[in-house]
Amino acid sequence: MMKKWWHDKVAYQIYPKSFADTDGDGIGDLRGVISRLDYLKELGVDIIWLSPIYQSPFVDQGYDISDYYRIAEEFGTMEEFDELLEETKKRNMYVLMDLVINHCSDKHEWFQKALADPYGKYAGFFHFVKGKDGKAPSNYRSYFGGSAWEPVPGTDLYYLHMFAKEQPDLNWENPALREEIYKMINWWLDKGLAGFRIDAIINIKKDLDFPSFEPDGPDGLASCVKMVEEVQGVGEYFEDIKRHTFAKYDAFTVAEVFNMKENELEEFIGEDGHFSSMFDFSAHMLAQGENGWYNSRKPSFKEWRDTIFASQMRMQKVGHAANIIENHDEPRGASRFLPEYAQNEAGKKMLATTSLLLYGIPFIYQGQEIGMTNCRRSDISEYDDINTKDQYMEALRAGCSVQQALDCCYENSRDNARTPMQWNGEKGAGFTDGTPWLALNPNYTEINVEEQDKRADSVLNYYRRLTALKKAPAYGETFTYGEFIPDYADQDGGFAYHRKTEDQDILIAANYGTEPCTLKLAGTSAEVLLSNIGNADIRAGEIAEKGTVTLESCEAAVLLLK
Ligand code: TEU
């Protein structure tokens, strides 16, 4: 495998709106990001991914861009962005922007011009399609609910939006559109960006016949994802983008890909793939309900672990996946993946251990490093997220009670991860001096950076040790390129795997069960490189004496086998 500069890095996702507010308006800003760079450096972060900071009406929190060349004024100025780049360079850190090019905002100049002249040049930047029998061109349901088609006023045309109606889809078939996008990407790369996280990219290829599908819900519509699954040829677009932009800069790209066709992995992230990496969502997909959040499910521990194992076995043959526990679209991992008895500091450290040392590039999501959790709300009005509001209504329509619908939101809402970062236990949590745009999780008085920074055995200090171990000169090669080999899979609650090179064998072992479990080690001795509950000495003694290692419930250990 050809080595790349990003293979051994640790990445961190910042959701700028909720990270750090320095001007008291309750909204995080770029100054706030700059002020926390040393914190991130100390956490062992190399690459920062910023969720969208472009000018936007924020209908979908910045994933609706109205000007690709401007910074949202809520977040700051282009000068501040340049300063951020400079400050990261000083610290040997890299910045990724979020690239949202499946759609833009309905307030973007292109779309405004298209509406003004529905048969002119800019209408060709979008999918303006004639309706059928006075109705929409097809029966697609958008990802955020309701028809994916919206009438173009004063015409018999409709425009396509796979997300909100304020997010019209761009027409990738049109060379003039592609040229504009490439120009924009290169403009940012010329500034010194290291690359991009690429949003919802699998959706850019459309079947221009827009065939209807068998309805899959009581609304008589069919998920627009059906079209994505059926249509062929999206890879040609990806290659075109890469050739005109990323490849010229050795940029790091990490794609958000759902619904990839089987057997396409090599084309996507192989040595000469479309992208440098893509997120591994396999464990997150397990919970997905057939019709929405109201029938989402809780996978068993074994199902969850085996899914991760299977994905690792597949991915490592091909390339470096981006591994996440959570992101801005997902509930907090500590609330979702840990059984109730493990929803404590030991459990959170265990989850970090088994996840961050997998084969691939770990992406830590802001607040994960202190073990932030889901946040319960007592009324739907306390949520901001467009997707949450839709799923709440969907649940009520399906017959759920208000309480049941709120429970679905507690478990699934994207706002769980979007509550402001908890920096300290004072009013505003150190996030803001004003009123936060989204109410804080009340547990900020207990779970916060300031408290954990001072306490040697905190989740935060454990994350620092874990990233340091992952990058330590003595083991870095193994954690980056060492083969992933699952082990002890028959142990109830056991989550164990090796990272192995020709001359090093490191065992990562954890006990997600309630009873202690004892693993017989293959070698004759082992050194304890990391332990999440501070009993490295006891384990070392047991290994020396009996050649076994016993893990209590919620215990994780990293062992160098000899
Ligand atoms: O997400 C794409 C996407 O498919 C999501 O709708 C995902 O299925 C959902 O959030 C799971 O709950 C990306 C962004 O990450 C998301 O924040 C945006 O809303 C979306 O694109 C539209 O740009």
Image: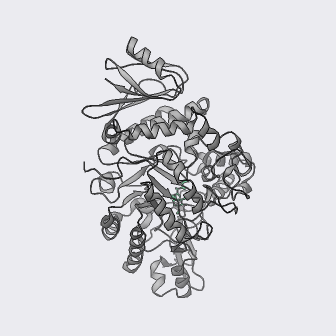
| Residue 158 locus on image (x, y percent) | 54, 77
Residue that protrudes farthest toward the front in the picture: 90
Q: Residue at x 59, y 46 (%)?
A: 295
Q: Is residue 26 left or right of residue 537?
A: right
| Residue 291 locus on image (x, y percent) | 57, 51
Given residues 513 and 35, the one toward you in this image is: 35
Where is 198 relative to 117, above or below?
Answer: above
Q: Is residue 396 left or right of residue 517?
A: right
Where is 353 relative to 407, above or below?
Answer: above
Asked if residue 213 shows in the view, the reply is: no
| Residue 275 locus on image (x, y percent) | 35, 58
Where is 308 relative to 318, above or below?
Answer: above
Given residues 406 and 75, the one toward you in this image is: 75
| Total number of numbered discs in the rendering | 0
Asked if residue 331 shows in the view, the reply is: yes
Q: Residue at x 57, y 39 (%)?
A: 334
| Residue 300 locus on image (x, y percent) | 52, 34
Q: Is residue 258 left or right of residue 407?
A: left
The quarter of the picture where the C terminus appears is: top left
Residue that protrudes farthest toward the top in the picture: 545
Q: Which colouring convention does the figure follow? A: one colour
Q: Residue at x 54, y 81 (%)?
A: 109
Q: Residue at x 67, y 51 (%)?
A: 430
